[in-house]
Amino acid sequence: MTDNTVTKHPLTLLGLGDMGTALARTWLAAGHPLTVWNRTAAKAEALAAEGAAVAASPAEAVAANTLVVLCLLDDASVGSVLDGIDLTGKDLVDLTTGTPAEGRRRAAWAEARGARFVDGGIMGTPAMIGVPASGAYVFHSGSRALFDTHRAALQVPAGARFVGEDPGHAALFDMALLSGMYGLFAGISHAYALIEGEDIAPKELAPLLSEWLGAMGFFVGNAADRLTSGDFTTGVVSNLAMQVAGSGTLLRTAEEQGVSAELITPYLELMRRRLAADPVAHAGEDTVGAITLLKR
Ligand code: FVH
């Protein structure tokens, strides 16, 4: 069998913002017949010139194909765009960023209307879409049957990773990774603020910071191991008591440099609370133990 069945896989895309447009271009370039709709019709013009069929309404776009991909601003816009449209027999893949609960509610909503549903979380920027070396990929969760049916088309823009039949899990993985990223950005931002006004160029700090953060990447696996075993004390290299004591130096340095410590204080405070809860039991722990304070 040739790849014709793959390259001719027709689909509809609702939403032509920066990300939707990037997705659309990859499907068109790969030869997939694509029907598009966007609230602001002008955004479809360039894609029409590249071969997309432009629908006059969301209902017309949905009627055109079984596979319907959504890439809108938020879950509320998905609800308003699909409101009142017959979804019977449709396969909805919602790449709009949302929360796990929104993914689960939207799946139930779609299934009640006779559609299969997969939620997606895009791990990449528009510039990374359609660039295999960029490392971009999409988390998918929900109907395994839908994912298997359309896998070839779904992995055209970026890698496609199925993370289970709970429709909330794609968003949960997405938000977990983004949360880790923002924590990293916070620390990096604080580091650059510390050197501002000194005779140290940002470009001098950059490679050192990058190398250090790479070396500290071991914390990801260390945390997973300790959270799995519940053992926060065996083989600890930098114990909690020492790190809490060292926090004061970080805070005094921020003060000396005239820098707000707002980005790093929450984590330092979490370590302090863990130690204060039981100084004898927790002094020799790894800082991973502090994670147990976060769950409400
Ligand atoms: N851009 C990025 O870097 C990130 C990467 C990770 C994933 N996100 C999510 O992708 C969704 C779309 O993001 P986007 O970059 O395409 O966003 P915009 O360029 O702002 O386009 C938004 C589209 O949504 C349409 N829209 C908004 N509200 C409504 C509504 N009430 N009814 C119908 N359509 C609506 C908007 O239409 P228009 O303004 O052009 O008429 C755009 O098509 C998003 O979930 C990111 O979090 C992107």
Image: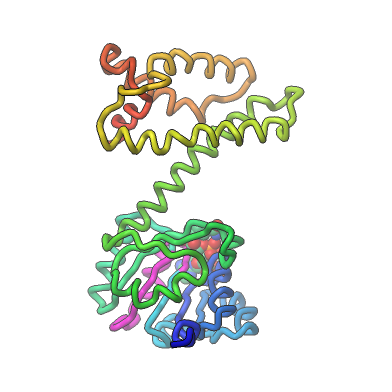
Q: Front-most of 180 and 53?
A: 180
The quarter in which the C terminus is drawn is top left
Residue located at (41% from left, 85% from top): 65
Q: State how many labels appear.
A: 0
On screen, residue 34 above or below 263: below
Residue located at (60% from left, 85% from top): 51
Question: Which corner quadrant of the image does residue 92 belong to?
Answer: bottom left
Whether residue 144 is visible:
yes
Residue located at (27% from left, 63% from top): 165
On screen, residue 172 above or below 30: above
The quarter in which the N terminus is drawn is bottom left
Q: Front-most of 233 and 258?
A: 233
- Residue 285 is situated, as x and y percent measured from the top left of the image, at 33, 21
Query: On the picture, is 39 further left or further right than 76?
Result: right
Q: How is the image coloured?
A: rainbow
Specify the segment rendered in magenta: 71-95
Whether residue 75 is visible:
no
Question: Which corner quadrant of the image does residue 147 belong to?
Answer: bottom left
- Residue 264 is situated, as x and y percent measured from the top left of the image, at 50, 28
As drawn, the residue found furthest toward the left would be 112
- Residue 217 is situated, as x and y percent measured from the top left of the image, at 48, 36
Residue 83 among magenta residues: yes
As drawn, the residue found furthest toward the right would be 199
On screen, residue 180 above or below 52: above
Residue 173 among magenta residues: no
Query: On the picture, is 41 further left or further right than 150?
Result: right
- Residue 15 is situated, as x and y percent measured from the top left of the image, at 50, 72
